[in-house]
Image: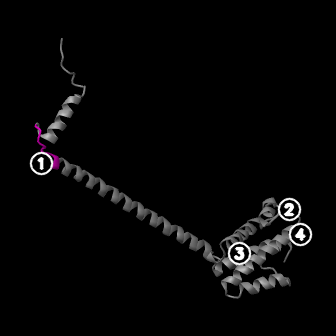
Amino acid sequence: MDNSVPGNQANIEYFFRKLYELLFGGSVTINYAAFLAFLAALWLWVTVIGYIIAVAGLFLIVYCMVRLFELREREEHFYSTLIAAPAHARVGNSRWQHIESLLGSGDASKWREAILEADIMLNDALFRRGYEGENVSDKLKNADAANFRALNDAWEAHKVRNQIAHEGSAFHLTETIARRTIARFETALRELGAL
């Protein structure tokens, strides 16, 4: 009967014996030179893997920064263009004139007040046109884009109003954003017949 181990099977006892010889050198005393050589080889691999991870992380950071700058550039382009209000003759509306005077003041707190006042006017105009809901958001949800072409303008303007209402002075309101928002309110109010 043949007691030999076939060539395709691992001999676990052999590996444990080699580990024992590595640590103890075949005797009771510890072979520190072999152990230190093993640690040096292990440290070399840890260092190489660490450098690879660091380089990959550096490339990831650079990629994210490039994408962030591209996003900021697109936002700057989007928010730097002004939306012109429709070129209709202005009807004498004292509330709207007050809003325009607040917008022309050059003070960010006055711009906030102008946007809040315009949102109140939008709420009143939607109510007069028969849109139901507790607030502007509910009324705009019930509006139909086929009957209210400026619905998207009203939503965008109302979103800015919500940011002002929730964030207060922490919301960075520029003159460009303020003028664009008031122009959107004006478009919606003109369609609703409030101006």
- Image x and y of residue 116, in percent: 75, 76
Which mark is drawn over residue 33? Answer: 1
- Say if 101 sits above or below 162 in the image: below
Q: Which of marks 4 and 1 is in front?
A: 1
Q: Which of marks 4 and 3 is nearer the N terminus?
A: 4
Most foreground residue, 65 or 47: 47
Is residue 89 in view from this perspective? Answer: no
Q: What element carries label 2?
A: loop
Q: In this picture, which residue range is highlighted in magenta?
A: 27-36
Magenta span contains residue 30: yes
Which of the image's four quarters has the C terminus? Answer: bottom right
User: Which residue lies most toward the top here?
Assistant: 1
Task: Check disc 3 and report the residue beneath it.
Answer: 181
Name which residue type carries label 3. Answer: Thr
Q: Is residue 161 left or right of residue 127?
A: left
Which mark is drawn over residue 128? Answer: 4
Tell me the CA gap for discs 1 and 2: 86 Å
Q: What element carries label 4?
A: helix
- Image x and y of residue 66, in percent: 45, 66
Tell me the CA gap for discs 4 and 1: 92 Å
Tell me the CA gap for discs 3 and 2: 23 Å
Q: Earlier in the sequence, mark 1 or mark 2?
A: 1
Is residue 111 in view from this perspective? Answer: yes
CB-based contact (under 8 Å), mark 1 and mark 2: no
